[in-house]
Amino acid sequence: ISKSLEDAKVPLLDNFASTVRSSDGQDVDDQDQYLARRLWIESKKLWHIVGPSIFSRMASYSMFVITQASAGHLGNLELAGISIATNVIIGFDFGLLRSWIVLFVCCVLLLPLYLCASLFLKLLGQPPEVAELSGLVAMWMIPLHFSFAFQFPLQRFLQSQMKAGVIAWVSLLALVVHLIVSWLFVYKLKLGVVGTAATLNFSWWVLTMSVSDD
């Protein structure tokens, strides 16, 4: 009789929602929750590294934007000179720097690009006054040029040591310093386009020295 009662309690239909399993034996619902949790954990770890690096790059390029904006208040000629020097010459230089192994030697080899910038720009068809001013700014950008050889390897080293947050904080410090120095050199001391170039040199070396101290 007891056996008959137990058989009567057996459901006629199985609960398929609770018995659907994957090929490895796990419930599908549990597997989905596990996958979502893993994705969340991996995303947090990824943004822990990538987030500070993104902020560092944004802060670094913001320095160039601030410098160009400061030069724009001086006049159209000054804006053209600083734009060509920072975008064309330095952009070409940075691309070559990344493709070389010995960065400091590469900086030395690329010095003629800065020393003869006026001549190169005239050959490319730039107006003489713009070429001369861009050449002057390029000469003042040589310290910035050499800072690349130290800063980018240091940033990669800190990233490999899981210290990307240090890069973000140092970049924020350098950005604040650049804002203050740009206001001082351009608006208070009236140093002109040379002052804008000097502020960029100063701020990037503050960034480089701060990263090296860490």
Image (cartoon, grey):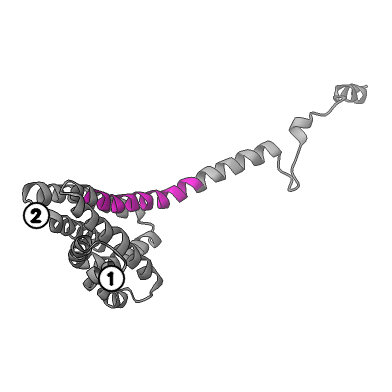
Tell me if label 1 and label 2 are in contact, CB under 8 Å. Answer: no
Please provide percent x and percent y for residue 23. Answer: 76, 47
Please provide percent x and percent y for residue 130. Answer: 22, 60
The amino acid at mark 1 is Phe
How dense is the environment of label 1, judged by Cα within 10 Å: few (below 14), some, or many (20 and up)? some
The residue located at (76%, 37%) in the rendering is 20
Please provide percent x and percent y for residue 190. Answer: 7, 51
The amino acid at mark 2 is Leu
Please state the extent of the stretch shown in magenta in the rendering.
43-67
* Quadrant in the picture for residue 158: bottom left
Report whether 138 appears left or right of 19.
left
Q: Is residue 9 magenta?
A: no
- Tell me if I can see residue 135 in this picture: yes
What label does residue 120 carry, if any?
1
Q: Is residue 99 above or below residue 200?
A: below
What label does residue 191 carry, if any?
2
